Amino acid sequence: MLITTAREAATVLFALLQSGAPPNELAERFDENVDWFIPGDTSVVPWIGRKTGRNGVAEFYAQLAAMTKAEAFDVATIVGDGDRCVALGSLRTTVVATGRVIETDFAFDIEIHDGLITRYRMFEDTLAVAAACASHVAGAGAQGC
């Protein structure tokens, strides 16, 4: 399938993600020089932060698959045409190491060039994600997943 809009790129990526596609297959949807960033505390949540290239993208999806169990990933809408779009939705995930559940709304900001994703931002409740990963209570030396 020839991808011509960011909306198409996002739709294909999310379908692959929900189908259980392996990390390397997901990473193929991204440009080698992708500008990838998911804000949050990387000392507690190892899969977030800045990733570099397809290897970084594959690493993200591999870490996510190893450290969490996805229970729901619902895209409510994708807004935008052309090279940029925003996807809005919600997710529910269990952190394997702690058994705690992450429930959050999300927004993805996605930009493409030549059919590949060149910019990728995910916005979510970073406090809820960190709390689900933390193995100790705050102030007592919280450690991550």
Image: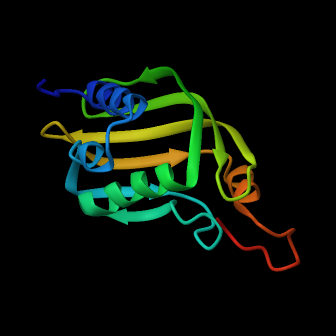
In this rendering, position of residue 102 left or right of residue 15: right
In the displayed structure, 43 sits above or below 51; it is: below
In this rendering, position of residue 52 left or right of residue 40: left
Nearer to us in this view, 12 or 97: 97
The residue under the point 27% across, 62% down is 55
In the displayed structure, 86 sits above or below 63; it is: above
Nearer to us in this view, 24 or 38: 24
The residue under the point 37% across, 25% down is 80
Q: Give the tally of numbered discs.
A: 0
Quadrant into which the N terminus falls: top left
Q: Where is residue 38 shown, x and y percent of the image?
A: 50, 55
Residue 44 in which image quadrant: bottom right
Nearer to us in this view, 84 or 38: 38
The residue under the point 78% across, 73% down is 142
The residue under the point 58% across, 43% down is 69
Q: Where is residue 54 shown, x and y percent of the image?
A: 25, 57
